[in-house]
Each structure stands twice: as structure tokens, then as C-alpha cells.
Amino acid sequence: MKTKIIPVAADNEKDVITLQKIATKSFTAMFGPYHEPQAVKAYTDEAYALTILRTELSNPESRTYFLKLDGRPIGYMKLNWRAAQTDQLFDNAMQLQRIYLLPEYWDQHLGSQLMEKALDEARQTGVATVWLGVWEHNERARHFYERYGFKKAGTHTFTIGSDQQTDFWYARSMMPAD
């Protein structure tokens, strides 16, 4: 098994369509069992519309990467800086907005490669803090982030259909310990 992390190209239609498929399938696998199917579909249809993805991919303050396994995309992550962040929670920060794997690759320790890449990007860009949102009931993801030194830093509401769920803000300092 050979893995590689590569940028997703906004001007490559195949990349954008592949991103849409991975985003929709992974989000649906994670949240589908807990929400009305039509609400999950409405969310993914809007959030992962090709026009939205192209706009996000074209933003110079965002970067999106595929994780490829043996040449096939199996997951992705999206990083945001400055105004591209969904919320302005911290000064000099990078948001890890999305980190998803196709469900058939869950629990194989492949997400750690995306996390290492995200932390490398944070170091290279000199941010003081990396932050993300994670659903309060997503124990697997919360434990994953905690292994990388992320700690709960607040909460916010994330809406899928009429369901208002609580997400935790998790943050990690990138500053060297004294």
C-alpha cells in the first residue's frame, strides 16, 4: 500500500467531481445514521455542490488535499487561513475545516497522514494555533484529535436539516512549550 497526499486542483474537473463524491459519501456515512436522510442529502447537495467546491478550491487562503492510496483518492482535508476560516476564533490561526476518509478506510490509521500534513502546513505558515470543529458525539474523531494535542476550546451549533447539534471547537497551540 502506497499513500500520497496531493493538492486538489480547482481547474481539473475530474478532481472536483472526485472531491464531491468523497465528501458526499464520507459525510453521509458519518452523519446519515443520526439524521433524516433527506436532511443529510440536502446538506451535501448544498455544501458539496460543484460550484461551491470550485469556489473553495480557488480561494488562495484555502488548500485542499487528496489522500491517495495506490493512486486512488480515498480521503481529503481542507485547510483555511485568514478570511477563509469559517469563524475568526483565534489570532494567527489555521482552521482544519474538513478531514474525511471514505468509510471503508476508517480505523486503518490513514487519517494520521492527513493530520501530519495539516500540522506541517501549520508549521510552514507560522500559525500560532490550529483549530477545528468536531461533533460532540463523534468519539472516534475526538479521540483522534486529542492524540494530536487538540483540546476543547468552546462549542457552536451545527445544523443539519432541522436538527441543531453541538460541535466542539478543538484547538492546538503550535507554539513551542516553555
Image: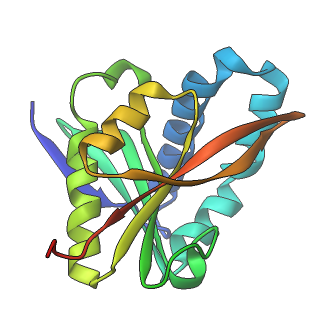
Q: Is residue 61 above or below residue 109?
A: below
In terms of image quadrants, where is residue 29? top right
Q: Is residue 18 left or right of residue 148?
A: right
**Residue at 63 percent of width and 67 percent of height:** 86
Residue 58, x across and y down, in percent? 54, 76
Q: Is 172 rendered above or below residue 177?
A: above
Q: Position of residue 87 (x, y in %)?
A: 64, 70
152 in relation to 79, above or below: above
Residue 79 makes an appearance in the image? yes
Q: Give the residue at the far top of this rendering.
A: 33
Quarter holding the N terminus is top left
Identified at 23% across, 24% down, the residue is 108
Q: Quadrant of the C terminus?
A: bottom left
Considering every residue shown, the one lying at the far front of the view is: 178
Which residue is situated farthest in the right direction here? 162
The answer to whether residue 101 of the structure is visible from this angle is: no
Residue 4 in picture, x, y percent from top left: 17, 49
In the visual, does 87 lie left or right of 171?
Answer: right
Q: Quadrant of residue 159?
A: top right
Relative vertical location of residue 151 with respect to residue 35 in this rendering, above or below: below
Q: Nearer the viewer, residue 131 or 59?
A: 131
Relative depth, front residue between 168 and 25: 168
The mark total stands at 0
User: Image point 27% across, 50% down: which residue?
Assistant: 114
Where residue 147 sits: x, y (%)? 25, 41
